[in-house]
Image (cartoon, helix red, strand yellow):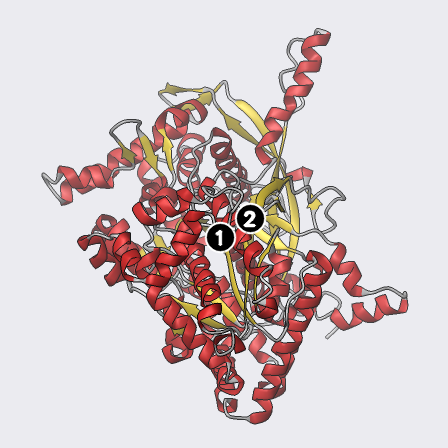
Amino acid sequence: LFFFNNVKKICLYRVYYISLEFYMGRTLQNTMVNLGLENACDEAMYQLGLEMEELEDMEEDAGLGNGGLGRLAACFLDSMASLGLAAYGYGIRYEFGIFNQKIVNGWQVEEADDWLRYGNPWEKARPEYMRPVHFYGRTEHHPDGVKWVDTQVVLALPYDTPIPGYRNNIVNTMRLWSAKAPCEFNLKDFNVGGYIQAVLDRNLAENISRVLYPNDNFFEGKELRLKQEYFVVSATLQDIIRRFKVSKFGSREIARTDFSKLPDKVAIQLNDTHPAMAIPELMRVLVDEEKLNWETAWDICVRTCAYTNHTVLPEALERWPVELFAHLLPRHLEIVYEINRRHLEVIAAKYPGDVDRLRRMSLIEEGGQKRINMAHLCIVGSHAVNGVAQIHSDILKATVFKDFYEMEPHKFQNKTNGITPRRWLVMCNPGLAEVIAERIGEDFIRDLDQLRNLIKFVNDEAFIRDIAKVKQENKMKFAVHLEEHYKVKINPNSMFDVQVKRIHEYKRQLLNCLHIITYYNRKDAFKMLRLFNVVSLTVALLQAAPGYHTAKMIIRLITAIGEVVNNDPVVGDRLKVIFLENYRVTLAEKGIPAADLSEQISTAGTEASGTGNMKFMLNGALTIGTMDGANVEMAEEAGEENLFIFGMRVDDVEALDKRGYHAEEYYNRLPELKQAIDQIAGGFFSPKQPDLFKEIVNMLMHHDRFKVFADYEDYIKCQEKVNALYKNPKEWTKKVIYNIAGCGKFSSDRTIAQYAREIWGVEPTLEKIPAPDDKH
C-alpha cells in the first residue's frame, strides 16, 4: 500500500518530453548499473560459463537520433527517472535509425540500420492504447464549431520502454509510436486487383515511422517529415488528455472534465521546433473537440507548453510552406492563422505604426513562397523559451529572437545542457569512477557537484599516478579494439587527439585538417626529432548526412590526408590520421575514455552548447576549443588556464563581419597556411584526381561563412602549447584533475532539476521509494 501511495503522490503532476529523436544506444549495461545488478549478473553469467561482455556486444544500438539533440533527450530520460519525476519521453519508433556508415575507397556510403531485425527485448507493444491520427481532408464551419472531415486515418501503435532511475526503485516510460494502416484502409473496391493494390498501399501509411531523417542542423522541407512531426504530436496529445481525464489511479473512467487544471497537472517540453505542431493541435482539441472558447484554450496551451531552442543557424530553422500545410493539415493552418492574427494585434497595440516589426515577428513569412516560421510559433505558444548554454541563450535574446525578448522578456531562460554521469562515467569508464570513489566516496554518482572535492588531491602523487594509469589502460584497450574491428594499428603511447562531431562546416573539421597538414609539413624542417618526440594521433570520429555534399567531400579529404600521412615511412607511427566509420553511442563509450585531447573548435557563436565536450572533460581529456557553446562555462568551472582556449570570441566574429572577412589576406600572410591550401588544391593528397578538392578550396577562399583561416594561426600556436604540456605528464594530469573536479555543473541531473523548478514547477527528489518486494 505504501508503494502505491508513493506512485499516486508522484503521478499527480506529469512531465511530457516530446522529441523526434532519442539516441539511446544500448540498454543492457545501463540498466544493470541503474538497478545495482552488475555484479549479480556477471556472477550468474559466469556460472553458466558465459561472458557478460559477449552478451553486451550482441545488443544493437538504438540509433533513433542524429547526434547531440537525440542523445540529450536520452540523458534527460535517465536524469528525470533518477530525480523521481513522473516523466514520459514521447517519440517515434523508427524502423530504421541513423544509417550505418561504410567508407569505401575513401568515400562515405550509407546502409540502412535494420536495428529491429532480431526484435527488441526492451520494448512492449501496447495495442490497447492505439490512437487514430488524421491527415488531409477539409474543414467545415458550423454554428456549433469547426469539423475536420474526409481525412485519411493512420493508427499510432505505442511501444513502451522502461527507463530505470539510478538505484531509487523508480521506473519511468519512453513511449514510441509506430504507424499502422487501419483495417479498412482503401478496401472499398473489392475486385481482386483493387484489393491487392489496397493491401499493398497499406505501406504508404506505415512509411511514416519507417526511417529517421538523417539531417543534423539542417532543415529539409519534405512532406513525410511534416507527417512524422504531426504523427508523434497528435498521438501523444491524445494520450496526455486521456491520462489527464482519468484522475483515479488504475481507473479508466473519465473523472476530470475541467481543463483549466491542465497546466497544473501537465507540462509539455518541446525538444526544438520538431514537435511545434503540439501548439496548434492542443488548440484544435480544446476548441473543436472540448468546446472551450479561444481565450481560455489559449491560456491553457501557453501555460502547458515550453520550448527548447537548439540552434541559431538559419539553415536549421524549420519554415514550412503554407501550401504544404493547407494540403496536409488544413484545420491546423486555420488555427495558426488565427494565432498569428491575435499575435499581430497585440504587437500593433504595443508598437503602433511599426510595420517592420510586425513583418519580423509574424508567424507567417511573406515574400516568394509563404512559410510558417515554427520557432516563432513555439515562442508565442509557450510560457518558457530556453537556450542550451549561457552564451547561446544570450545570443537568442540579442539577435535571433530579439523582438520577442523585448516584448516578453519573462519567457526567456537558460538551461545549460548536461550529460548523465551513469552512462558517461560509471558505465563507460569504471576504472576512473573507482579511482574517484576511493577518494571521495560514491555519492558523486547522484550528486556530481561532489567532484569539487577532488581539488584537494591535485598535488597528491598517488592520485596523479592513478588518474594517469587509468587513462593509459583505456588507451591500450581502445588500441586493441581498433586493431580488432578496424584493422588499424596505433601507438598507445601517442597523444590521442580526438574530434567527435557530425560533419558540418560550422564545426570546422577543416581547421583540424589544416592543423594535421601543417604538422605533417614540419617533419622535414624539424628533422623529425625535436617536434616529433611528442607524438600526435588524430582520431576523427564523424558522420555526414547523405544529402550534404560538402560534408561528404570533407570526409573524402580526411581519408585522403590519412592515405598520405599514414603511408609516409619518414613519419612512421608518430603521426596517424584515422577516420573511424560508423560512429555511434557504443563507439563513443569506448573512444571517449581513451582521449587525451578533445577538439571543440566551432566558430564562436555557432555551436549552441555541445555535450561531447562535457563527456571528454568528465573522462579526463583536456579541451582545445573556442569560446563557444558550453566551452565558455567549462572554462569558468575548471579555470580557463586548464583549457587550451584559442581564437575569436563572439564580439571578434561580429567585428570581422562588419569589416569583411577576406580569406586571401590570411592565405598570403601565413606561409604554412598557403602551403597546406596549395597542397589540397594541387592534388598532393589526390594525385590521381588533382582537382578533387577544388571546391573545398574555393569555399575556404571565397565563401567561408565560418572563417576557418581567421582562427588558423592562433589554433596552430595553441596546438604547440598542447604539445609542450604533453611532454610533462605530471602537469598535464594536474590539469586533467582540475577539469574532472569542474564537471559537477555538467550533469544532466542539474539541468533537469532546473527545468523542473524553473519551467515545469515541480520539485525533484533524491528520495528512494521502497522496492515492491521490500517488507519493511
Q: Is residue 566 above or below residue 144?
A: below
Residue type at mark 2?
A: Gly
Q: Residue at x 29, y 64 (%)?
A: 648
Which label is found at residue 494?
none
x and y percent of residue 720 in the render? 42, 74
Observer able to see residue 605:
no
Is residue 178 visible to us here? yes
Q: Could you say which quadrant of the image residue 512 lies in? A: bottom left
Identify residue for label 2. 65
Which residue is pictured at 53% across the width and 47% down the height?
21
Measure how far apart labels 2 and 1 are at the Cα level: 7 Å
Q: Which mark is residue 69?
A: 1
Considering the image in quadrants, where does the C terminus appear? bottom right
- Residue 323 position by quadrant: top left
- Foreground pick, 392 / 287: 392
Quadrant assignment, res 152: top right
- Where in the figure is residue 621, as x and y percent of width and height? 52, 73
Q: Residue furthest top?
A: 191
SS state under label 1 = helix
Indicate whether 126 appears above or below 427: above
Work out whether residue 68 or residue 322 is closer to the camera in this orientation and state it: 68
Asked if labels 1 and 2 touch by Cβ distance under 8 angstroms, the answer is: yes
Residue neighbourhood size for the residue with mark 2, other residues' Cα within 10 Å, grouped as few (<14), some (14–19), many (≥20): many
